Image (cartoon, rainbow, N blue to C red):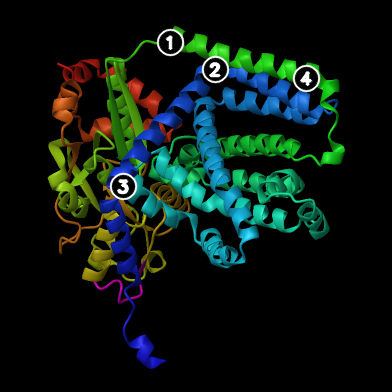
């Protein structure tokens, strides 16, 4: 046993090598799926959003009435729930989420039902597939994001990939179970009458297994819906992005509203799919309900027709489209939204996508995103810049004088990192694991001997960190946090940096703009705007503070632009 434990098996290296080999060897195949899937799902989403929200609400309410008969609970819930989502300006996010769930569920059903039937027919297949399904269901959903990004980059396609892996097993298992539960005497009777395997499957086994299979399909849809928040971490649009943003910024209200919208969507989908799962004995003769069928057809045609009319009525195209990505830090939320709103004001269409730090760099480097204004150099993002510098164009600073370090309230009797002994329960409150300032904080704790003295770094998120800071200051308690400027917390609270005589956090930084290779040739006007985008620390902090005080990032950006119109116009000259 000791011999086995002497050397560590390089499993992580094996897996990484396998993924790299697949990414390189099948890059053309993955690109086709990415491009085709993106166009398909954008088309579905555009088609859904083209239909006026009021028409969709009325249409789905009518469908709910048709399937529920004289029971008014579900139709009323459908009407009021969708009305609430539209009232909260989450309609387009709802349609994006529905597209993700729809495509993920369809792919899972197309793969899952035949695979489950095959398992029921071949015991060897069942023995092979069963442990694979166990693996798929027990592996944390976050893990699937890593190969999803490697294969397909960012966006809705890798979100579907991760969702399918996570949501597929129930359909496979229940299809297998449904076929196996068909009474053997009926199967033997079919055999005795000379039925072919095809006849036996489609005329006996599948009809009897339908209810069990549909129960599995229902669970698959619910699991696909549960993945939308995780999928938003790699750029999938929809309600999940709002929940993720709320978690990262500790915004309870926003998180509740987006979460409530997901609950409403889940209940509506669940009830509609349950209505499909009716036992043969409970089905009513269709001849008595021709009016229901014609009503459903008329409503569906009206919904589609309104979408077509709306599409032609709003068919104007913007001058250019730019895909901007950013890391969900308060400073980058401010700068990205200001630039986006300024470009929209000048006729551009801008897609903003919040991403994890490493994925942000990767998406620009591989050309899936156009640009970012969120590169902290030379220290915070040094590792990412070193890895991708040959694959990007670095345009230079859009803001200078940025700084990172350990921050404490001004009332604490410490001035240097070397002064820290037992304050704040020997804890540094950090932000996201893997963030540059988090890594620098770990280095500083090691450099100053804090780690050996029992200090620990507690990662959280930028929002959770500021909440913890606010609570500590209110209670006049000690707290040490990872901080950076520009940041609104320096305007709201009396704070100070701890001096860093050993230079663990490096020198002062700048926030830089970088683009994908080829953007200058593809979109020269947008490239010039990005190159001219410049502002200062006070500008950024004013926008950040406005967002912190309750304004949406878009509203805060528009207000700042209105107050600095000449400066903004100079970016476009």
Task: Residue under label 4, please give it.
Answer: 292
Compute the Cα span from label 3 to label 2. Answer: 33 Å
Height in image: 470 above or below 421?
above
Secondary structure of the residue carrying numbered label 4 = helix
Compute the Cα span from label 2 to label 4. Answer: 22 Å
Of label 3 and label 2, which has the lower sequence position?
A: 2
Task: Residue under label 1, please give it.
Answer: 314
**Is the Cβ of the residue at disc 3 closer than 8 Å to that at disc 2?**
no
**Is the Cβ of the residue at disc 1 closer than 8 Å to that at disc 3?**
no
Task: Residue under label 2, please give it.
Answer: 51
Q: Residue at x 83, y 34 (%)?
A: 283
Question: What is the span of residues highlighted in magenta in the rendered image?
Answer: 448-456
Secondary structure of the residue carrying numbered label 1 = loop
Of label 1 and label 2, which has the lower sequence position?
A: 2
Compute the Cα span from label 1 to label 3. Answer: 34 Å
Q: Give the quadrant of the C terminus.
A: top left
Say which of marks 2 and 4 sits in front: 4
């Amino acid at each position: 046993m000791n011999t086995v434990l002497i050397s560590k098996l390089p499993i992580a290296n094996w897996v990484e090598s396998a993924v790299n080999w697949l990414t390189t060897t099948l890059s053309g195949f993955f690109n086709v799926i990415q491009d085709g899937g993106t166009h398909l799902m954008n088309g579905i989403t555009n088609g859904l959003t083209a239909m006026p929200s009021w028409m969709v609400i009325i249409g789905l309410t009518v469908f709910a009435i048709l399937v529920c008969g004289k029971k008014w609970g579900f139709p009323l819930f459908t009407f009021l729930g969708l009305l609430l989502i539209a009232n909260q300006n989450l309609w387009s996010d709802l349609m994006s989420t529905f597209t993700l769930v729809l495509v993920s569920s369809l792919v899972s059903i197309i793969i899952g039902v035949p695979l489950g039937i095959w398992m029921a027919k071949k015991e060897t297949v069942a023995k092979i597939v069963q442990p694979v399904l166990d693996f798929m269901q027990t592996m944390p959903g976050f893990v699937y994001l890593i190969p999803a990004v490697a294969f397909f980059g960012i966006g809705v396609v890798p979100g579907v990939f991760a969702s399918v892996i996570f949501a597929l097993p129930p359909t496979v298992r229940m299809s297998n179970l449904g076929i196996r539960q068909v009474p053997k005497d009926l199967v033997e009777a079919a055999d005795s009458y000379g039925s072919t395997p095809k006849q036996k499957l489609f005329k006996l086994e599948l009809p009897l297994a339908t209810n069990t299979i549909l129960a599995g399909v229902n669970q698959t849809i619910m699991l696909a819906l549960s993945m939308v928040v995780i999928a938003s971490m790699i750029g999938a649009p929809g309600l999940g992005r709002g929940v993720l943003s709320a978690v990262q910024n500790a915004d309870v209200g926003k998180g509740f509203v987006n979460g409530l919208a997901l609950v409403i969507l889940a209940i509506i989908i669940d009830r509609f799919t349950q209505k499909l799962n009716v036992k043969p004995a409970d089905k009513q003769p269709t001849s008595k309900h021709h009016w229901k069928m014609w009503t459903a057809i008329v409503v569906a045609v009206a919904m589609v027709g309104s979408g077509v009319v709306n599409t032609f009525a709003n068919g104007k195209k913007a001058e250019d489209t730019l895909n901007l990505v950013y890391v969900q830090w308060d400073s980058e939320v401010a700068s990205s939204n200001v630039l986006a709103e300024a470009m929209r004001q000048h006729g551009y269409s801008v897609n903003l996508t919040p991403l994890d730090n490493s994925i942000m760099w990767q998406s620009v480097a591989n050309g899936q995103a156009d640009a970012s204004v969120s590169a902290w150099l030379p220290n915070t993002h040094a590792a990412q810049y070193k890895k991708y510098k040959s694959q990007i164009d670095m345009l230079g600073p859009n803001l200078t004088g940025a700084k990172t370090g350990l921050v404490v309230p001004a009332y604490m009797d410490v001035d240097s990192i070397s002064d820290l002994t037992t304050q704040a329960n020997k804890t540094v409150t950090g932000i996201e694991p893997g963030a540059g300032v988090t890594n620098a904080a770990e280095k500083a704790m090691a450099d100053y001997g804090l780690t050996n003295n029992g200090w620990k770094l507690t990662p959280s998120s930028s929002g959770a960190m500021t909440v913890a800071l606010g609570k500590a200051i209110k209670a006049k308690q000690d707290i040490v946090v990872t901080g950076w400027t520009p940041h609104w917390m320096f305007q709201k609270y009396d704070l100070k940096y701890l001096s860093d005589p050993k230079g663990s956090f490096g020198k002062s930084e700048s926030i830089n703009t970088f683009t994908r290779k080829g953007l200058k040739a593809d979109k020269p006007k947008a490239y010039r705007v990005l190159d001219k985008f410049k502002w200062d620390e006070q500008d950024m902090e004013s926008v950040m503070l406005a967002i912190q005080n309750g304004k949406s990032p878009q509203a805060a950006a528009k207000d700042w632009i209105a107050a600095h119109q000449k400066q903004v116009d100079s970016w476009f000259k």
